[in-house]
Image (tube, rainbow, N blue to C red):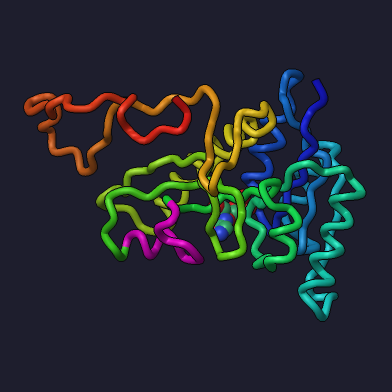
Amino acid sequence: MARLKIAVLISGRGSNMQALIEACSTEDAPAEIALVLSNVPDAAGLKFAEQNGIPTVTIDHRKFSERDSFEQKISSCLVDAKIELVCLAGFMRLLTAGFVDTWRDRLINIHPSLLPAFKGLDTHARVIAEGARFSGCTVHFVRSEMDSGPIIIQAAVPVALDDDADSLARRVLEAEHRIYPQALRLIAEGRVTVDNDLVRIEGARTPASSVINPDIGLEGQNPAPTTFTAMETRNHGD
Ligand code: GAR
């Protein structure tokens, strides 16, 4: 079967891009990274892509007086490379409704929080300032409002009592590197549909148990009544 042609858009380090490239490097991968595009000429991620034989292109937003013409240039590169799915991976430019609508349901993003909580920048510092017990990360289809759109997959990451923004960011990033390749695989295998702006996933299960943070050593002593089953929870996949 033909592999889904992917473009990854980056602005910097590109560690999520790297996770996607590595996930697509196996023979049975259902997707191929056909293009890495950066708006920052010296983005560190470009080097990794080049070393792995992936075509790269830089479209420097500072050379465009209008956001529209910058985005049109991106779109024409994507079309020329016959891209079928665009993955934003630390691409730090807001995209206009025009671009987002052109690529509707073919444009996904990763954000380092459990959306819809903590949209925007400085996520980890804000999570800690709020005293949240869990953070995490989300892969979602992109809509024109910032960090919004139908959610494909999330990982919950417990916030440690002694976490600072950097230590939390490191653990969330590890989870990002796990879920982004999984989201890509689900889409490339044709298992994802968007229905009424909610994502349905064929053949996916919901983990059975909840996670409590902090763990005060009482789990098992006072088991919760089993008044519902996984089947009764809202789960589009089952
Ligand atoms: C990642 O943590 C990603 O979730 C975040 O930027 C980082 C890029 O790291 N994206 C956003 O905040 C988008 N709203 P990377 O370049 O190493 O993948």
Name the foreground residue: 104 vs 89: 104
Name the foreground residue: 187 vs 138: 187
Does residue 40 appear left or right of residue 183 in this picture?
right
Image-quarter location of ligand 1: bottom right
Name the foreground residue: 50 vs 110: 110
Does residue 127 appear left or right of residue 76 in this picture?
left
- Identify the residue shown where x is 37% and y is 50%: 135
- Identify the residue shown where x is 70% and y is 55%: 10
- Identify the residue shown where x is 79% and y is 48%: 36
Q: Can you say whether 172 is above or below 187 in the image?
A: below
**Coordinates of residue 56 in the picture (x, y in percent):** 85, 49
- Identify the residue shown where x is 67% and y is 37%: 20
Name the foreground residue: 40 vs 153: 153
Does residue 100 appear left or right of residue 215 in this picture?
right
Does residue 211 appear left or right of residue 42 in this picture?
left
Quadrant assignment, res 131: bottom left
Q: Which residues are magenta?
A: 115-128
Quadrant where the image shows the N terminus: top right
Q: Can you say whether 30 is above or below 195 in the image?
A: above
Q: Can you say whether 69 is above or below 185 in the image?
A: below
**Coordinates of residue 9 in the picture (x, y in percent):** 73, 53
Does residue 49 show up magenta in the picture? no
**Coordinates of residue 207 in the picture (x, y in percent):** 36, 27
Quadrant where the image shows the C terminus: top left
Quadrant assignment, res 55: top right
Q: Find the residue positioned furthest to the bottom.
A: 65
Does residue 121 show up magenta in the picture? yes
